Amino acid sequence: MLAAFEKKHRASGKLVVIGMHGQNESPDKVAALCKSRGVEYPIVQGNQYTKKQVPGIPRAFVFDHTGREIFDGNPSGAEAAAEKALADAPALWLGETTYTKLKPLAVQVEKKEKLGSAAAALRAKLQSSDEAEKTEAEALLQVIDGYASRCKASAASLREENADQYLARLDALAKELAGDSTGDEFKTLKDKEAADPEFQKLRKGLKELADQAKAVESLPCCKACKGKSMKSISLSCETCKQANAEALTTLKKALAALQKKYEGTAVATKAADLAGSL
């Protein structure tokens, strides 16, 4: 559940999910389990959150944009708490700084309204002879630049997962920050990627891989799994695999062809991973 939730909010740059384990398992075993469950957020070993005694696992903690703990309990309730925190948080948090000289610009930044023009105005304020105004401009620019940096990182995480979403995110950021050098950087990156033959190859390969993944998901489950309300094949169920043996063999051949066609790219790696699960 958390894996899908994290992916849903990843592009926003507003949510950070970190997993912890203390089961004394090897890193390889933890990595394999995470891959099988679609977990892509960081997992650390050992619980360093020592403010309180953790009564049992699984356990989830949710913190709002100020760092205040707002949830402590079973992970099943964490998503609702996180959704509320995301809804209650300002579009951009300005920290603890009080803005007086540049209050209109501070309000504009907090609401994420015309961020590019706000950033350009603030960069001009860096030359101000008024030290208080200059200090406020520096603080607000740190907020915008920090936001842009987080967005760039979250967009980059989409590059080898969904190339179309990646380009769309870069385009949206270029428009959101239009009027400032940061917006120009996002537009330049988007145009460069769109014109890159290697990226276009990756983009095409990811689409082909997505088609194969959908083909796997469309396979029917066995009677036992159907009785558990499953709607498609369970790759952890040997009976499901036996019932779809012929189709799975065909899919493995198609995935092997993708590995060969896109050798040396993320497509080949993902195709090999999917084939290994069949």
Image (tube, rainbow, N blue to C red):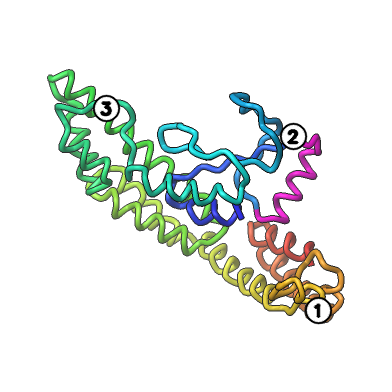
For mark 3, give the secondary structure: helix
Q: Position of residue 23 (x, y in %)?
A: 78, 37
Please name the predominant secondary structure of the magenta segment in the image.
helix
Query: What crowding class fits label 2: few (fewer than 14 Cα within 10 Å), some (14-19), or many (20 or more)?
Result: few
**268 lies above or below 127:** below
Specify the amino acid type for callout 3: Glu
Mark 1 or mark 3: whose residue is earlier in sequence? 3
- The residue drawn where x is 68% and y is 78% is 218
Q: Nearer the viewer, mark 2 or mark 1?
A: 1
- 10 Å crowding of disc 1: few (<14), some (14-19), many (20+): few
The spot of residue 30 in percent (x, y) is 75, 44
Hey, what amino acid is under mark 2?
Gly
Measure how far apart labels 1 and 3 are at the Cα level.
63 Å
Q: Amino acid at mark 1?
A: Lys
Q: CA distance from mark 2 to mark 1?
A: 37 Å
Residue 138 numbered mark, or none: 3
Magenta span: 23-38
Q: Residue at x 78, y 67 (%)?
A: 235
The image position of residue 242, as x and y in percent, is 87, 76
Q: Which mark is residue 223?
A: 1
- Residue 38 numbered tag: none
Residue at image position (65%, 41%) is 59
The quadrant of the rendering that contains the C terminus is bottom right
Q: Quadrant of the N terminus?
A: bottom right
Tag 1 near tag 3, CB within 8 Å: no
Near-viewer residue (189 or 126): 126
Residue 110: name its quadrant.
top left
Query: Mark 3 touching mark 2, by CB under 8 A?
Result: no
Q: Could you tell whether 19 is left or right of 11 in the image?
A: right
Residue 97, quarter of the rendered image: top left
